[in-house]
C-alpha cells in the first residue's frame, strides 16, 4: 500500500471493509423477525404445486454463526493487516514470516554446516554427505544455467572438465561464487575492418588445429599480437585473471565454427555469472565450492591422504 502516493486507495479500502461488515450486521438484524407464537404461515409463494415458502425465522444457531464470522473479522482486522494501511497490532508481514521460517530452518542445519566450514574444501569434497548437500544446492541454484549434469552449454561453462576461465582451485571457485564474474571481451567490428577480422578468425582457429587458410593465418598473426594478446596472451593461452579463455585447447565456450568465432570477434562477449555470496551465505558457498571443485578432481585421493582429519 505504501507504493501509493495519494491517500485515496487507503481510505477506499478502509471504507469498503467497514461498510461490508456493517452491511452484514444490518442484514442479520433486519431478518431477525419475531419468534412465531403460534402457527407459522405461508408466504404465499408456491412452486411445482407442493413446494411452498413458510415464514419460519432463521434457526438461532445459524444466525449465531453469522455473528461469529463478523466478530472474527473484527478481531482479525485488529491483529493482522487488512484495513488499508493499518498494519495490525501483531505487526505481521509476509517478509517477517518468511524470515522467521528461514531462520528456524537455518538454525536446524547450522551445526551440520559449521562442521563442514571448519574443514577445507578438498576434505569437504571427499565427504559423501557433504557432496549430497552440495548437489542439492547446486540443483536449486546453479543447474538452470550450468545444466543438471554441470556440463554447461553455449556461453555457460562446463564445470566438470578441468578447463577453467577463472581458475579451478578452491579459492578461485569460491571467489567466482561469492562475487560473480563479468567477462569483458570487447567488440572489434569498429576496430578492425572485415578482412582483418576474417584473418584473425582464421589465425584463432589455427591455434587449436582447426582448418584455416594459410595466407589468412599469416596475416592474422600480427593482428592478434596487436589486438588480442593483451588479454588472451601472446600464444593465445588465455589469462585467468580476467577470464580470457585459452584459445589453443580445443574447448570452446561459444563455439569453434568460423561463423561463431567471427561473431565472438565482431560483437565481443560478455558472459555474466551472478554473485551468490549474499544470497547463499558463507556456509552454503563453502559446500558448493567443495562440490564444484570435486566435480573435476579426484576426491578419493584426498580422502585417503587426509582421512585422519576428515573424521573429526
Ligand atoms: C544466470 C546464470 C548462472 C547461474 C544461476 C550460475 N552461473 Fe555460474 N556462470 C555463468 C556464466 C555465464 C559463467 C561464465 C562467465 C564468463 O563468461 O566469464 C559462469 C561461470 C561460473 C564459474 C567459473 C567457471 C570457470 O571456468 O572459471 C563457476 C565455477 C560457476 N559459474 C559456478 C556456478 C555455481 C556453483 C552456481 C550456483 C551457485 C552458478 N555458477 C550459478 C552463469 C550462471
Ligand atoms: C580486454 C580483453 C580481451 C581482448 C582485448 C580480447 N579478448 Fe577475446 N575474450 C576475452 C574474454 C574475457 C573472453 C570470454 C568472454 C566470456 O566469457 O563471455 C573472450 C572470449 C573470446 C572468444 C570466445 C572463445 C570461446 O571459447 O568461445 C574468442 C574467439 C576471442 N575472445 C577471440 C579474441 C580475439 C580474436 C581478439 C582480438 C581481436 C580478442 N579476443 C580480444 C577478453 C578479451
Image: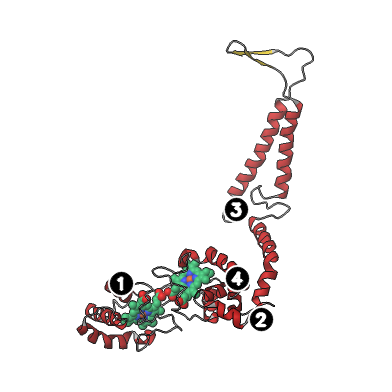
Question: Sequence-wise, which precedes: disc 1 or disc 3?
Answer: 3
Q: Secondary structure at mark 4?
A: helix
- Farthest residue, direction front: 304
Residue position for label 4: 128
Instruction: Tell us which disc is closer to us: 4 or 3.
Output: 4
Q: Residues within 10 Å of mark 2 (few under 14, many from 20)?
A: few
Q: Residue at x 72, y 47 (%)?
A: 78
Query: Which quarter of the frame holds ligand 2?
Result: bottom left
Residue position for label 3: 1
Residue 3: x percent and y percent? 57, 56
Q: Residues within 10 Å of mark 3 (few under 14, many from 20)?
A: few
Q: CA distance from mark 1 to mark 3?
A: 50 Å
Residue 158: x percent and y percent? 44, 72
Asked if marks 1 and 2 touch (Cβ < 8 Å), the reply is no
Q: Residue at x 68, y 33 (%)?
A: 24
Instruction: Tell us which disc is closer to us: 2 or 3.
Output: 2
Q: Residues within 10 Å of mark 1 (few under 14, many from 20)?
A: few
Q: Is mark 1 within 8 Å of ligand 2?
A: yes
Residue 146: x percent and y percent? 46, 68
Q: In this rendering, is residue 87 above or below 234?
A: above
Residue position for label 1: 260
Q: CA distance from mark 4 to mark 3?
A: 48 Å
The numbered dot on residue 309 is 2
Q: Quadrant of residue 190?
A: bottom left
**Residue situated in front as seen by the camera: 276 or 63:** 276
Q: Residue at x 34, y 88 (%)?
A: 235
Question: Sequence-wise, which precedes: disc 2 or disc 3?
Answer: 3
Q: CA distance from mark 4 to mark 1?
A: 40 Å
Q: Is residue 185 something one can see in this rendering?
A: no
Could you tell me which quadrant the C terminus lies in? bottom right
Amino acid at each position: 500500500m505504501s507504493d501509493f502516493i495519494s491517500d485515496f486507495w487507503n481510505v477506499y479500502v478502509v471504507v469498503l471493509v467497514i461498510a461490508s461488515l456493517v452491511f452484514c450486521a444490518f442484514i442479520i438484524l433486519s431478518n431477525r423477525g419475531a419468534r412465531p407464537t403460534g402457527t407459522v404461515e405461508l408466504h404465499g409463494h408456491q412452486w411445482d404445486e407442493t413446494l411452498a415458502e413458510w415464514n419460519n425465522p432463521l434457526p438461532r444457531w445459524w444466525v449465531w454463526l453469522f455473528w461469529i464470522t463478523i466478530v472474527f473479522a473484527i478481531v482479525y482486522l485488529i491483529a493482522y493487516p487488512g484495513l488499508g494501511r493499518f498494519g495490525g497490532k501483531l505487526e505481521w508481514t509476509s517478509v517477517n514470516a518468511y524470515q522467521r521460517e528461514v531462520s528456524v530452518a537455518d538454525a536446524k542445519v547450522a551445526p551440520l554446516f559449521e562442521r563442514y566450514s571448519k574443514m577445507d574444501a578438498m576434505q569437504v569434497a571427499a565427504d559423501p554427505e557433504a557432496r549430497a548437500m552440495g548437489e542439492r544446492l547446486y540443483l536449486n541454484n546453479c543447474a538452470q544455467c550450468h545444466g543438471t549434469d554441470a556440463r554447461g552449454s553455449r556461453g555457460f561453462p562446463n564445470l566438470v572438465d578441468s578447463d577453467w576461465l577463472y581458475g579451478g582451485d578452491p579459492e578461485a571457485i569460491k571467489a567466482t561464487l561469492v562475487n560473480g564474474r563479468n567477462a569483458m571481451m570487447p567488440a572489434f567490428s569498429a576496430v578492425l575492418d572485415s578482412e582483418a577480422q576474417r584473418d584473425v578468425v582464421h589465425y584463432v582457429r589455427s591455434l587449436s588445429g582447426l582448418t584455416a587458410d594459410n595466407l589468412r593465418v599469416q596475416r592474422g598473426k600480427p593482428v592478434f599480437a596487436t589486438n588480442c594478446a593483451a588479454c588472451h596472451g601472446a600464444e593465445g593461452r588465455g589469462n585467468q585473471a580476467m577470464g580470457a579463455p585459452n584459445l589453443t585447447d580445443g574447448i570452446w565456450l561459444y563455439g569453434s565454427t568460423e561463423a561463431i568465432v567471427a561473431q565472438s570477434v565482431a560483437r565481443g562477449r560478455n558472459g555474466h555469472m551472478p554473485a551468490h555470496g549474499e544470497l547463499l551465505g558463507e556456509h552454503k558457498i563453502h559446500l558448493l565450492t567443495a562440490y564444484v571443485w570435486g566435480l573435476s578432481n579426484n576426491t578419493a585421493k584426498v580422502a585417503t591422504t587426509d582421512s585422519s582429519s576428515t573424521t573429526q
